[in-house]
């Protein structure tokens, strides 16, 4: 809830307490919860601008969830999606592509291709395939439109994708696309700066 309300500092502190507590358990259910808590903790770190800390947390989360086994495969796929999304924001497309195919395979097998998280993974994969920034930005915009139409304007993945898209456009100085995106997607509740 705190992450959804853009209160990442508060969320980060509470998640760290959960992580500290969960590290005392070695059974699979608690290890899976630890991996999930670390994924959300990474989101809070990323929202505060700590990309390095977020990456470290996501890599550890992925390792824990992979070690748990098949019962944690969906959470493992979610963590890979978050890690690949982080890599996209850093321009690390080859690293993202290597991992996102695993996530799409898991999510497609478990839920099918109409599942929101599968669509998110598929969008990340499509962005990895394009060779130039213009095509990548078009691919992101098209993926966001698909997410909005399929799952509604208040889906949490849509908000996160929009926040990253707006940030990328701002960093590029692409004021025309940024203004068009704000007009098109303000209903989705993305942060407008």
Image (tube, grey):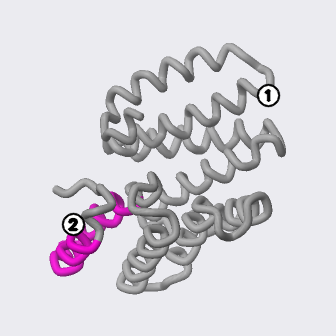
Provide residue 126's location: percent of width, then percent of height: 55, 77
Kindly indicate whether the residue at mark 1 contacts the one at mark 2 (C-beta within 8 angstroms). no
Q: Residue at x 40, y 23 (%)?
A: 13
The residue singled out by tag 1 in the image is 28
Main SS class of the magenta portion in the image? helix
Q: Is residue 29 magenta?
A: no
Q: Residue at x 35, y 85 (%)?
A: 134
Number of disc labels? 2
Q: Tell me: residue 71, above or below residue 95.
A: above
Provide residue 144's location: percent of width, then percent of height: 42, 71
Q: Please state the extent of the stretch shown in magenta in the rendering.
A: 161-184
Q: Earlier in the sequence, mark 2 or mark 1?
A: 1
Q: Quadrant of residue 45?
A: top left
Q: Residue at x 21, y 72 (%)?
A: 183
Q: Is residue 163 magenta?
A: yes
Circle 1 residues within 10 Å: few <14, some 14–19, many ≥20: some
């Amino acid at each position: 809830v705190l992450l959804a309300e853009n209160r990442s500092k508060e969320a980060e502190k509470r998640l760290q307490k959960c992580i500290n507590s969960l590290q005392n358990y070695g059974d699979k259910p608690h290890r899976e919860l630890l991996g999930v808590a670390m994924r959300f903790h990474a989101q809070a770190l990323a929202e505060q601008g700590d990309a390095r800390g977020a990456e470290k947390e996501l890599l550890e989360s992925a390792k824990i969830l992979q070690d748990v086994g098949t019962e944690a495969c969906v959470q493992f796929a979610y963590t890979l999606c978050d890690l690949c999304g982080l890599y996209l924001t850093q321009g690390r497309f080859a690293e993202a592509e290597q991992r996102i195919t695993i996530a799409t395979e898991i999510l497609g097998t478990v839920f099918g291709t109409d599942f929101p998280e599968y669509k998110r993974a598929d969008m990340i994969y499509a962005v990895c395939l394009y060779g130039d920034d213009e095509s990548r930005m078009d691919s992101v915009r098209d993926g966001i439109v698909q997410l909005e139409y399929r799952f509604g304007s208040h889906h949490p993945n849509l908000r996160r994708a929009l926040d990253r898209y707006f940030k990328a456009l701002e960093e590029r100085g692409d004021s025309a696309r940024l203004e068009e995106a704000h007009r098109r997607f303000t209903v989705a509740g993305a942060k407008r700066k």
